[in-house]
Amino acid sequence: MGRFRLSTGPRRLDLPTSATRVIAFLALRPFANQRSHVAGQLWPDVTEQRARANLRNAVWKANAAADGLVEGDAGTIRLSENVDVDVAVLQTAARDLLERSHPLDASVSPHIFAEEMLLGWDDDWALFERERIKQLCLHALEALSLHQLEAGSPAAAIDAALLAVRLEPLRESAHRAISRAHLAEGNIAQAVRQFERYGALLHRELGLLPSAGYHELLELRAPVV
């Protein structure tokens, strides 16, 4: 999450851009990928022959920096199973929360959900994966907020919802989660202030008003438009 980083033990590895892109791509697809597909995704503007040559060269550079980092055969390629990927940890924790199988593991900080992935990368595949992971994080943070509220911890519920707001400031469901937690504490004024802050932001950015559901949560009369 955040900006790309690869390390072995305490040592950070600096790789050529081509190798970095291959590793990031494979880290998001923890299975055997067709070499032709990987090459086409990473080098879409060159011939297939050139793209496959670029891929072979990038894999060689990656394995020169860390032996066995990338594995494969004549037709497929994958990241070694010995590599720990932060996005994989995030996805497992998020799915546990969303499936309500168990609450967030104590060793996992909620802040893992609050960063966007591969910042600064504008490849089509990276933009798609960034948005996919962002949406998963937003739903996980809102689920965590609800779990904390149900567990009688409104302060922790507010903290989780605030992380969701930081990640997506115009997301109404995250703002509602904050107001709901304030109401659980009996802090009606703070719940209303959160609603007003969101309403002002929404109107300024999009010229819209909060939903009727948000008004109903606070028992406010929705304005007639």
Image (tube, rainbow, N blue to C red):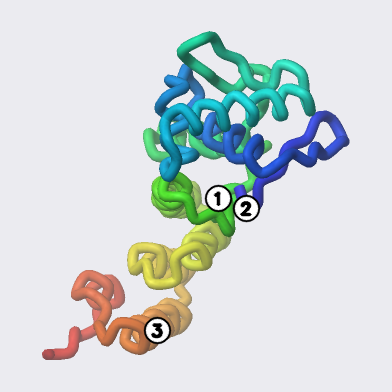
Q: Earlier in the sequence, mark 1 or mark 2?
A: 2
Q: Relative to the observer, which residue lies in front, 130 or 217? A: 130
- Rendered position, 199 above or below 130: below
Residue at position x 49%, y 36% in the image: 91
- Are dots 1 and 2 in contact, CB under 8 Å? yes
Q: Residue at x 44, y 65 (%)?
A: 168
As measured in the structure, the alpha-carbon distance from the residue carrying label 3 to the one carrying label 1 is 25 Å
Residue 21 lies left or right of residue 192; in this view the side is: right
Q: Position of residue 136 (x, y in %)?
A: 42, 46
Report the Cα–Cα distance between label 3 and label 2. 26 Å
**In the image, which is nearer the foreground, mark 3 or mark 2?**
2
Report how many numbered discs are placed on residues in the image: 3
* Furthest-left residue in this view: 224
Q: Residue furthest right?
A: 10
- Residue 96: mark in rendering: none
- Report x, y in % for residue 130: 46, 50
Q: What x and y, as percent, mark residue 152?
A: 50, 52
Q: Nearer the viewer, residue 186 or 193?
A: 193
Identify residue type, mark 2.
Gly
The residue singled out by tag 1 in the image is 117
The residue indicated by pointer 2 is 2
- Front tag of 3 and 1: 1
Spatial CA distance of label 1 from label 2 is: 5 Å
* Residue marked by disc 3: 201
Give the amino acid type for the residue marked by disc 1 in the picture: Met
Depicted 121 relative to depicted 98: above or below:
below
